[in-house]
Amino acid sequence: MAEQLDLRTATMAKVLVNQGHYRKAADIYRYLAEQNPDSTAYVHVLADLENKIEQQARSRDLAALIQKWVSLLLKLERLKYLQQVRNNIDGSGRI
């Protein structure tokens, strides 16, 4: 039976970081830090990654807020238009 490869390496973590998969890379660095408790290099890289993960989350939150704001603006414009149509109908009996 073939031996199973462990892909939890620093190289794989770097590839994941370059692809923007910070959480997966952080998991690998956490594993490597546990396997190499005398090395602080993985701990430092992990700290940087956790900052990137937090920034990424804030960016997603901001994007969601902007999307909601634009949606509300569009609804407000639609409401104003419908109120104007209603006022025209009420005032003259025709559009």
Image (cartoon, rainbow, N blue to C red):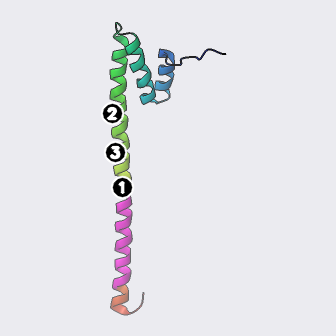
Residue 5 rendering spot, x and y as whole percentages? 57, 16
**Residue bearing mark 1:** 68
Q: Which mark is residue 54?
A: 2
Q: Which quarter of the rendering shows the N terminus?
A: top right
Residue 75 rendering spot, x and y as whole percentages? 37, 66
Res 58 quadrant in image:
top left
Of tags 2 and 3, the one toward the viewer is 2
Residue 4 rendering spot, x and y as whole percentages? 59, 17
What is the CA distance from the residue labelled 2 to the residue labelled 3? 12 Å
Q: Are marks 2 and 3 in contact (CB under 8 Å)?
A: no
Q: Residue furthest top?
A: 38
| For marks 2 and 3 on the same chain, the one whose residue lies earlier in the sequence | 2
The question of residue 77 being in magenta is answered with yes
Res 43 quadrant in image:
top left
What is the CA distance from the residue labelled 3 to the residue labelled 1? 10 Å
Q: Disc 3 marks which amino acid?
A: Leu
**Residue bearing mark 3:** 62
Mark 3: secondary structure: helix
| For marks 3 and 1 on the same chain, the one whose residue lies earlier in the sequence | 3
Left or right, 13 with respect to 83, comes to right
Question: Which SS does the magenta portion mostly show?
Answer: helix
Mark 2: secondary structure: helix
Q: Residue at x 34, y 22 (%)?
A: 48
Q: Which residues are magenta?
A: 70-87
Residue 68 rendering spot, x and y as whole percentages? 36, 55
As rendered, which of 44 and 9 lies closer to the eye? 9
Q: Residue at x 51, y 22 (%)?
A: 15
Q: Residues within 10 Å of mark 1 (few under 14, many from 20)?
A: few
